[in-house]
Image (cartoon, rainbow, N blue to C red):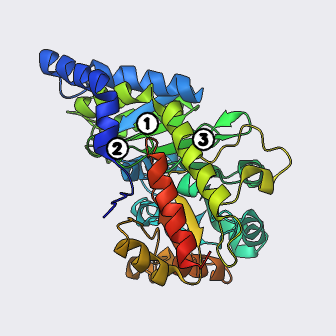
Amino acid sequence: MNQVPMLDLCTEYQYMKQDIDAALQRCLAHQKWIFGPEIEAFEKAVAAYLSVSDCVAVSSGTEALVLSLRALAIERKGTEYFTGDDEIITTPFTFTATGDAILRSGATPVFVDIDPRTYNIDTGRIRDYLSSPQGKARVAGIIPVHLYGQPADMDAIGQIAAEHDLFVVEDVAQAFGATWKTGKLGSLGTTGAFSFFPSKNLGSFGDAGMIATNEKNLAALLRMLIKHGGRDKYNVDHIGYNGRMDTLQAAVLLAKLRYIDEFNAGRERVAAFYTKELSDIEGLFLPVRPDERTADAAGMPHVFHQYTIRTASRDALQAYLTEEGISSMVYYPVPLHNMAVFKGRMQCYGTLSHAEQAAQEVLSLPVGPLQREEDSFFVAQRVKRFFGR
């Protein structure tokens, strides 16, 4: 039976093997495993790629979010943490880490519904909440998530933030390399938080993350927080973390960075094939294209960390694909506001029905930068067969 994985990391490694092996050999030679030369080199390379002043390499994408919020609490409030009276608006349709980071920073997450076309946060709902008395008084910031590799509406979010003096922490865990008009995602907010989990578009050989910012003071605070909270590790200023990236991960990521645009283009080719093959199936909703969102679509690619379809027959379709040897995944089956960890620790604004429906209906198909054409064809044909086409 033909087997189609969600992502073939072994094939990716073989494609980049010469560069990755050379990077690992350099680390073995110098033996500088903590803050080795690859850390600074990777930070500078990503900063140049994103066109930001500073990047800070950290231990994971989750810590990138937590550290961003901790630094903002110190900078904006002069306190180590936010309090429960400080609210941060985000989407309930995302990985747990987005909302959990808000709790870990001391603040209260406010969940507002998503745009059902893009699965990203509904900026109209953000405006509505901020027009309420509670929203005006308590909201400190916004965390938009560029879900599945699709940019959130950063024009609207930036305008809202400027009007209300809010910070914006971009959750770019799934969208490294994507752009919004003329700027790379992660460069448009107060900070951009990246994950380099192995399955990401730019993936490490373990856990790793990055924070991008154009604010020098924030960058300085972040560099303290990842080293237990001080410039001097024996005389610290803040409640900190062991949040640094390992040299080994920086070396791997630095080697893989030169392939990111090529690999993102590969994902987009697979996505374009799926869209062409599946576009006329009634009851099957495909990822929205940039030209369907706005007339000014140039430079706003969806980098397809996931190719996510939506159907009321999701569970039956997934079971059928499994029988046919095709991997698929549900990202995410439980919206954050329905998780026990957030009970009594959150605010929900209005109905979150679009997020709840998406959780019941979305399914991500295999999409890899080096995915074989015959595998993409096989997946598309089996989806069409399920729907009787």
Please name the residue that numbered disc 1 is placed on: 221
- Nearer to me, 163 or 21: 21
Occupied quadrant, residue 309: bottom right
Q: Which mark is residue 238?
A: 2
Quadrant holding the N terminus: bottom left
Of callouts 2 and 3, the N-terminal one: 3
Q: Residue furthest right?
A: 295
Label 2 and label 1: CA atoms lie apart by 9 Å
The amino acid type, in three-letter code, at marker 3 is Ala
Residue 33 in percent (x, y) is at 18, 27
Q: Which element carries disc 1, helix, strand or loop?
A: helix
| Of marks 2 and 3, the one in the foreground | 3
Occupied quadrant, residue 27: top left
Label 2 and label 3: CA atoms lie apart by 34 Å
| Of marks 1 and 3, the one in the foreground | 3
Q: Please say if the residues under marks 2 and 1 sit with CB atoms less than 8 Å apart.
A: yes
Q: Along the horizontal axis of the image, is 298 left or right of 312?
A: right
Q: Which mark is residue 178?
A: 3
Of callouts 2 and 1, the N-terminal one: 1
The amino acid type, in three-letter code, at marker 1 is Leu
Looking at the image, residue 230 lies above or below residue 195? above
Quadrant holding the C terminus: bottom right
The amino acid type, in three-letter code, at marker 2 is His
Residue 132 in percent (x, y) is at 76, 74
Residue 388 in percent (x, y) is at 59, 79
- Residue in view at x 71 percent, y 49 percent: 154
- Nearer to me, 159 or 163: 159
